[in-house]
Amino acid sequence: MKLSLLSAGSREKSLVLPEARNDFLFAVTGSPWGLLACWLVFINLITFLAFGLDKWKAKRKEKKETVRRIPEKNLLLMAAAGGSIGTLLGMKVFHHKTLHKAFQLGVPLILALQIIIPFGLWLYFSVIR
C-alpha cells in the first residue's frame, strides 16, 4: 500500500506501509528505534522474571534447601543493560532487594542516567548543534 503526501515544498513524498505480517515485522525490527524498543521490552521482561526467580530461590534457601541464587551484580548488570524499569517493578511486586542500598540508590540512578543521556544527546545533535 502506497500513500502520497504533499509537503510544503510541493515535492511529493511517498510512504510505504506494510502489506503483510512479515512486512510489519521488518518495519518494526528493521529500524534502529524498533530494535531498541524490542530490546527494552525483552530485557525488562527478563529482569522482572529474574527478580521473581531470585525471590523464589531466597524463600527456598530459608528452608535449608540447596539452591543457587542470582548474584546481585548480575541483577544490577541487567538493570544497567536497559532493564531498570523491570528491576523497579520486580522490587515492588516481589518485595525483593528493597532494603539493599545498592538497589535503593543504584537502580533509580541507572534509570535517571538512561533517560538523561539519550535526551542530552538528542538535545545536542538536534537543537544545539
Image (cartoon, rainbow, N blue to C red):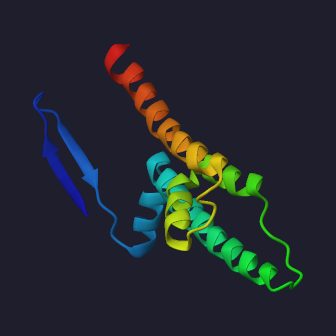
Residue 63 on image: x %, y %? 80, 86
Residue 55 as seen in the image, left or right of residue 73? left
**Point 55% across, 67% down: residue:** 45
**Point 61% across, 57% down: residue:** 99
**Point 49% across, 31% down: residue:** 117
Among the 4 quarters of the image, the one containing residue 74 = bottom right
Residue 36 as seen in the image, left or right of residue 4? right
List the single residue furthest toward the right. 66
List the single residue furthest toward the top. 129
Q: Is residue 41 visible?
A: yes
Q: Is residue 30 visible?
A: no
Quadrant position of the N terminus in the picture: bottom left
Number of numbered tags placed on the structure image: 0
Residue 126 on image: x %, y %? 35, 23
Residue 39 on image: x %, y %? 55, 57
Residue 82 on image: x %, y %? 57, 50
Above/below status of 60 relative to 55: below
Quadrant position of the C terminus in the picture: top left
**Point 77% across, 83% down: residue:** 60
Q: Nearer the viewer, residue 125 or 44?
A: 44
Q: Nearer the viewer, residue 2 or 88?
A: 88
Q: Nearer the viewer, residue 107 or 77?
A: 107
Q: Nearer the viewer, residue 17 or 12?
A: 17
Residue 88 as seen in the image, left or right of residue 69? left
Residue 101 as seen in the image, left or right of residue 22? right
Among the 4 quarters of the image, the one containing residue 83 = bottom right
